[in-house]
Amino acid sequence: MRIGLPRALLYFYFRPSLEYLDQENIAEILISSATNKRKLEQGLALCDEEVCLPVKVLMGHVHSLLEEVDALFVPRVISLEKKRYICPKFLGLPDMVRAGLGRKTPLIAPEINAGWSKSRQLREVAKSLRLLGVQPLKLWDALNRAEEVQKQHRRQLAVALDLPPAGKRVAVLGHAYNIFDEYLNFSILKKLSLLGMEPVTVGNFSRDQINQGACGLSKDLFWSYGRELVGAAFYCLNSRAVDGVILVASFGCGPDSLITEIIGRRFSDSPIPLMSIILDEHSSGIGLATRVEAFVDMLNWRDMA
Ligand code: SF4
């Protein structure tokens, strides 16, 4: 049985562990190819106007897999760490996919909730993978090893700020699905590197650095990814670890509109320049490149002043 995995949303956070599971041959997995115009247009056609851009992109990926797989993996994610939650869109994702694409292709949609005990989480995943005939113990082992691969990957990335910068350092802060989907963001990370900057992303901040930054909030945020963004941005402000910050948000995203406001206010009288970019389906690569180039020019001119 071939399982389709859309290269969208949480795929970009969990790529190391998902690729590890793919190699482990727990199941035959087909990951959709990179986002392109066709997938985006298909996603737009399947969603309501007001849905955020990344969910529209996911729908395009799901659609691209339909003819090639026997089932689709679209988990219902509630929480990834205790007492914190992720955006409610992830909770309703399997329902959105069913509403948009019908019930012809079965969905593997385990409920993922870090608030549950480990054994309950395993039972839930094992139940949803029953049709693959995977032994629960084998699955448990593979999931534990995949978790370790993910942690190891994070540890390797999180040393970046302790190393000497290769050029001016710019923190590009946003959800992984906006930052690492090159079609959506017009390759902003590559663009910055070509302009002589060293881009860093949220993954390059250690858990401690994020917690230190997030201490600056008057009230703790219960959104996992929103808190990471605010923590990383505030850490940049306090430590002066970067020369500039670019915030990348999605049009139609409720959490991003609040996070952008919280960060923007704190940076309003700071010496570290901040630029906000909102991605939507009408974004233009030329417009974005011009803004990035102007931002980089400004960082370079500050040294000459
Ligand atoms: S956090 Fe924002 S961009 Fe991400 S799924 Fe939720 S609404 Fe969409």
Image: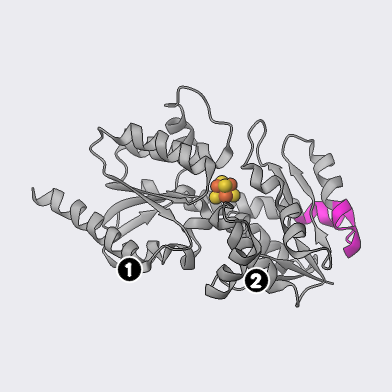
Nearer to me, 210 or 35 = 35
Write the residue at 72% across / 38% down: 114
Residue beneath disc 1: 286
- Tell me residue 262's x, y (percent): 41, 33
Q: Residue 133 lies in magenta, yes or no?
A: yes
Residue type pointed to by label 1: Ile
**Mark 2 and 1 residues: CB-CB less than 8 Å, in contact?**
no
Q: Does the residue labelled 2 lie within 8 Å of ligand 1?
A: no
The x and y percentages for residue 106 are: 84, 64
* Sequence-first tag of 2 and 1: 2
Image location (x, y in percent) of residue 222: 58, 32
Looking at the rendering, the stretch of residues picked out in magenta corresponds to 126-142
Residue 83 in the figure: left or right of residue 202: right
Give me the C-alpha separation between circle 2 and circle 1.
27 Å
Please tell me in which quadrant of the rendered image residue 57 appears: bottom right
Which residue is pictured at 54% across the width and 30% down the height?
A: 221
The chosen color scheme is one colour
Foreground residue, 97 or 127?
A: 97
Q: Which of 193 and 138 is in front in this view?
A: 193
Res 167 quadrant in image:
bottom left
Q: Does 270 lie within the magenta span? A: no
Q: Which residue is drawn at 85% across and 54% down?
A: 128
User: Which residue is most to the left?
Assistant: 305
Q: Is residue 14 above or below residue 215?
A: below
Q: Can residue 131 be seen in this view?
A: yes
